[in-house]
Image (cartoon, helix red, strand yellow):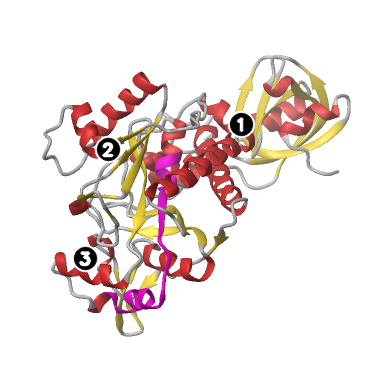
Amino acid sequence: MRRTLSTQLSAHFGHTVRIAGWAHRRRLLRSVAFLIVRDATGLTQVVVTDPGVRAAVAALTEETVVEVVGTVTENPSAPAGVELTDPTVRPLGPPAEPTPFDLFRPTLTATLPTQLDHAPLALRHPRRSAALRVSAAAVAGFRAALDARGFTEVHTPKLVGTATESGADVFAVDYFGRPAYLAQSPQFYKQLLVGALERVYEVGPVFRAEPHDTARHLAQYTSLDVELGFVTDHRDVMAVLRDTLADLLGTVAERAGAALRALDVSVPAVPAQIPAVHFTEALAIVGAPADEPDLAPAHERALGEWARREHGSELVYVTGYPMAKRPFYTHPDPARPAYSNGFDLLLRGVELVTGGQRLHRHADYLAALAARGEPTGPYADYLAAFRHGLPPHGGFAIGLERLVARLTGAANVREVTPFPRDLRRLTP
């Protein structure tokens, strides 16, 4: 008999089926016992009246892997409106040892550090696993959106020979006796691949050895990167980002609808035109000094509230960040050279995406590095490609974990990361 999942039971009323999963919860009453079995799709209630089967259920420990054969019976009060009756119950392994926290409760009551210490168990909880399903749907939607727009998926090296891209701290490794580093981003490679493929994207890990210990930073996270050629300026990039995000969120709603319902959340609407404010205007909106070089998290939250209040939007672009706060490859605003053709996209008051137009002329790169007092040597391979003609181009990067945290309402990106790596954690 083939295994039936919990979500498939309603198609088998009156028939005998076989289910298998984990003993999620037991309730032992005087004349009846209830066994809740959890599988990848949900919960199944098993009603036990036979004394021998009841004894077997009483001997089970929660999280023991079991197989149940029984009759599918309608019961509107049971999970999914069905239950199994007249069952036989057979363990598929030894009794599970007691867990450090209860997985059957609606929410995990253990502290986040305790959950992360026991991540293989915590991820079994329906709310934690729901976030992972939202993440998977987001990646699927990202890929589908860009495939439909003529982009090619690429895979760039995660071991690199220079530690200077973007100025962030890096993880050094030994590469056959030579120094190497874990890649901080695919930025240089995706720009160079515009010269071959024009429109590219990548889904992959990036590594930042920055000593941040906040609810929004990880030392390793998944970056959804995009780069496209033949743009007029950053506004072309913003238009692609808007459409990509709309399709991505549509896929999340379609493919992870059950997970969203389990978390009692919904995806935000993406307006046809996402509101945009220049950096200088953003400072005025949040009441920050006019010479402030960047937006603090409190400023981002205030801008999120402003966008909801003034535009009914949970998304808002901030454009024209000061060039001093952007990487050297960022294209300046021709009309205001102190400001950039770069942008951030905020979702629900948190920076979600960074992007912009890049420089594309070799001479401009030499001038930009000279202005910052940086040598060209570490960038020799990267700069060489610009001698041979690259079109005006730009791109953006979405932090997957931060996106999922905003969609699910998680207060900390570690809640939506299966096995997070941060300043203090390297295991499990």
Frontmost of labels 3 and 1 is: 3
Q: Which residue is mark 1?
A: 257
Is 344 rendered above or below residue 174? above
- Going by the image, does 31 lie left or right of 369? right
Residue nearest the observer in this picture, 9 or 346: 346
- Which disc number belongs to residue 278? 2
Residue nearest the observer in this picture, 261 or 117: 261
Q: Is residue 141 visible?
A: yes
Residue nearest the observer in this picture, 342 or 50: 342
Q: Residue at x 25, y 68 (%)?
A: 164
Residue 423 coordinates in the image, percent (x, y): 27, 52
Is 352 rendered above or below residue 372? above
Residue 330 coordinates in the image, percent (x, y): 29, 57
Q: Which residue is mark 3?
A: 368
Image quadrant assignment for residue 306: top left
Question: How much space separates mark 3 and mark 1, taking CA atoms?
Answer: 47 Å
Question: How much space separates mark 1 and mark 2, taking CA atoms?
Answer: 35 Å
Q: Residue at x 59, y 52 (%)?
A: 149
Disc 1, disc 2: CB below 8 Å? no
Frontmost of labels 1 and 2 is: 2
Image quadrant assignment for residue 288: top left
Residue 72 coordinates in the image, percent (x, y): 82, 26
**Element class at badge 2:** strand
First to last magenta residue range: 379-403
Residue 342 coordinates in the image, percent (x, y): 31, 49
Q: Quarter of the image for the N terminus: give it.
A: top right
